[in-house]
Amino acid sequence: MKAVIIEDEKLSADHLCNLLKRIDPSIEVVEIIDSVKKSIALFGRGLKMDLLFVDIHLADGLSFDIFSKVIVDTPVIFTTAYNEYAIKAFEVNSVDYLLKPIGTDELKRAIDKYKKYSNSGHSALLENIASAYKSLNKPYKNRFLVKLGDTIVSIKTEDITHFIAEDGIVLLSATSGKRYPVDYTLDQLESLLSPESFFRINRRVYLHINSVQKVSSYFNGRLKLGSDLLQGDDGVVSRERVVDFKNWLDR
């Protein structure tokens, strides 16, 4: 079996190669590619493989751009370090992915799934890849129409500091200092707003990145935002979200 790895971190690529040799010595890694641009060029020249391992975020863009430029008639296993919204797209569309750091058991399961697709044909998997690409590149909301009394106001997303769930409703908090009820749950908002700009720090608060001015360590492995906008535990990043929150800030 011939495999190609698209990965811009050498340590990650070497780790994956070593795991593949350990799991199945018959797998031969014929090429390691470190960018979208090189991938498009090599595939355009007819690079062939049986299985493709693809990191989602590369130095020169999303690896999904590869599939929008060239036809790759090969099953794909995606890898990601933290991209939560991408993982959700894969779950919906049943596309294989591995969460870094990649473990032996997870990799073996993914290869077993590849073998199942090999026996039944690749068309379904390739269709799912295309669907995932569309999901990740869908347009997000850039404004909200809100009502306060008899007044209807249009608020741009960049003028939103955060959303907060209070007493069974969700309130939009604007940079003007005003708050407006919206007809969405926080779960719904997570699929409507760009994950580049907004992050859900806990079960009550969905925050715009421009609202993050200062972050401090907090007890129990959590983080505390230095903000006049959020009081008490509303400004605390829950422990299970701390790693993703740090990665979100560090993009």
Image (cartoon, grey):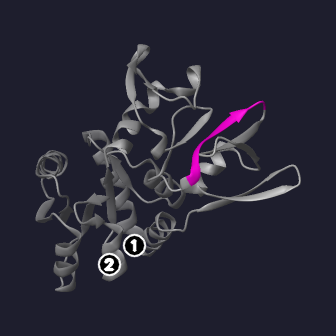
Quarter-of-image position of residue 241 = top left
Within-10-Å neighbours for mark 1: few <14, some 14–19, many 20+? some
Given the image, on which type of amino acid does mark 2 rest? Answer: Asp
Please state if 144 lies on the left or on the right of 215 as rendered: right
- In which quadrant of the rendered image does the N terminus lie? bottom left
Q: Residue furthest top?
A: 219
Identify which residue, 188 or 28, lies in the foreground.
Answer: 188
Residue in view at x 37 percent, y 34 percent: 243
Q: Which residue is mark 1?
A: 122
Residue in view at x 31 percent, y 66 percent: 63
CA–CA distance in space, label 1 to label 2:
8 Å
In the rendered image, residue 32, in percent from the top left (x then y), is placed at 13, 63
Q: Which residue is mark 2?
A: 73
Q: Label 2's element?
A: loop
Q: Which residues are magenta?
A: 159-167
Quarter-of-image position of residue 41 = bottom left
Give yes or no for contact between labels 1 and 2 (Cβ–Cβ under 8 Å).
Answer: yes
